[in-house]
Image: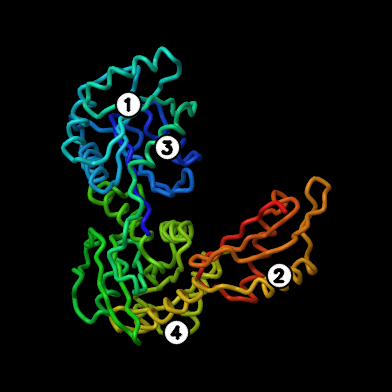
Amino acid sequence: MSAPIVAIVGRPNVGKSTLFNRIIRQQKAIVDEQAGVTRDRHYDRTEWSGKEFTIVDTGGFLIHFKNSIDRGIRYQIEEAIDEADAVLLLTDVRSGVTDIDKIMAKMLLKSKKPTILVVNKVDNARMESEAGVFMSLGLGEPSAVSALHGMRVGNLLDRILTLLPEKIPKSDDEKSLSIAILGKPNVGKSSIVNALIGKNKMLVTEIPGTTRDSIDSYITRNGRLYRLIDTAGLRKRSKVYENIEYYSTLRAVRSLDQCHIAVIIVDAREGIQTQDLKIIDMAVQVKRGIVIALNKWDLIRQDKTIQKEVLQSARDKLKIADYIEILSTSAITKVRVFKLLDVCTQIFEEWNKTVETSELNKMVQEAITRHHPPAYYGKQVSIKYCTQTSSAPPVMTFFVNHPDGIGESYKRYLQKHIRKRFGFSGVPLTLKFKKK
């Protein structure tokens, strides 16, 4: 099921990025006293009271535009509102109700989107009483918070959950295997989809960024129904100036929510770049099966040594994520294009796989015998028991006397042994450690 989307909007310098960071409980969005620092949309998955949602931070809403970037920010705010399941209109108690606040309130009332009016920078009881003046915006009772100090943010989150739908149903047939086609612009995503479905359903040109939206296609192969989601190219943030790109990126995020497997298309001539790694990380974060398709393989010199070097270079870029499948393809010659579906099917089976508890514990004991967990503040760390607590995606839960004593290196050690024994190729594994 897709995670609901909540957008934070408001005029510049009211604390949108500070509230975003507070909600996701990390420092990600740029925060600065200078108005207009946030120029692109930041988004992240978070949860409250067991319910997950995606929170989106937008740039400051302006009435007058100094340049095309300001105009683009205005447009992306409007698109964020259109895409969101709920909206937070953030205001500043110290500034009172401004003309921009009034314009945004009218926009939100017209949109009929579920909206919470949030009055920020309410640091004491006197300011809390002053928040009542924002009732004049017509958006109902305001939620007074201090994003900087975290005051009453929990109450705001409780209120957000009441606005979110219980479920956002997928639009595809529940029996289909959903595959999101992701990647930078002009790497051949639409060409791959066209080659698979056998017709030019997608517009394919040499101009980067032709695909502006997520488009679904269906194909049946070997009795299985596949849903193909062709998404807009994800650009580097420094190059995201055209307003519609903001919307495309958020759509790609939602596509990851709706898919089982993420196929990340890379131009084989360029190899895996920094932006490709960011896209891969997005897929890892939501625990989807992952395949990397080195496309345009027909443009690689037909020399086995060179081809091996290209594949090895891609493998080296993945570092510890060596479980990810890599396949060389050509949308033009259709080399290994249909094998891409076969690999996705295999990974889907791995994604759904469940390991018997007895077999898993046998493997864990063997791993511990070879290399025991390091001591934790002078205390011996003992793994008592392990079981797979879920599949699709797979989660392994370990019961330990000192869970905090299991460091990242030992977690990677355990993952390596799990994969060596049970596979899970192309699938991110989640290892949880609980107190026994």
Distance Cα–Cα, label 1 vs label 4: 66 Å
Residue visible at 68% across and 58% down in the picture? 409
Mark 4–mark 2 CB contact (< 8 Å): no
Which residue in the structure is indicated by mark 2? 361
Residue visible at 35% across and 82% down in the picture? 224
Circle count: 4
Q: Earlier in the sequence, mark 2 or mark 1?
A: 1
Which residue in the structure is indicated by mark 1? 142
Between marks 2 and 3 in the image, the one whose residue lies nearer the viewer: 3
Which residue in the structure is indicated by mark 3? 158
Disc 4 is placed on an element classified as loop
Q: Amino acid at mark 1?
A: Pro
Residue density around tag 3, few if under 14, some if 14–19, many if 20 or more, within 10 Å = few
Distance Cα–Cα, label 2 vs label 1: 53 Å
Q: Is residue 63 left or right of residue 127?
A: left
Between marks 1 and 4 in the image, the one whose residue lies nearer the viewer: 1
Residue density around tag 2, few if under 14, some if 14–19, many if 20 or more, within 10 Å = some
**Do we see residue 353 in this rendering?**
yes
Distance Cα–Cα, label 1 vs label 3: 14 Å
Which residue in the structure is indicated by mark 4? 303
Residue density around tag 1, few if under 14, some if 14–19, many if 20 or more, within 10 Å = many
Q: Amino acid at mark 2?
A: Asn
Disc 1 is placed on an element classified as loop
Quadrant (top left, top right, bottom left, bottom right) of the N terminus: bottom left
Q: Is residue 46 left or right of residue 354?
A: left
Distance Cα–Cα, label 4 vs label 2: 46 Å
Label disc, if present, on residue 165 of the rendered structure:
none
Q: Amino acid at mark 4?
A: Asp
Q: Relative to 281, is 110 above or below?
A: above
Name the outermost residue toward the bottom: 222
Foreground residue among 200 and 103: 103
Mark 2–mark 3 CB contact (< 8 Å): no
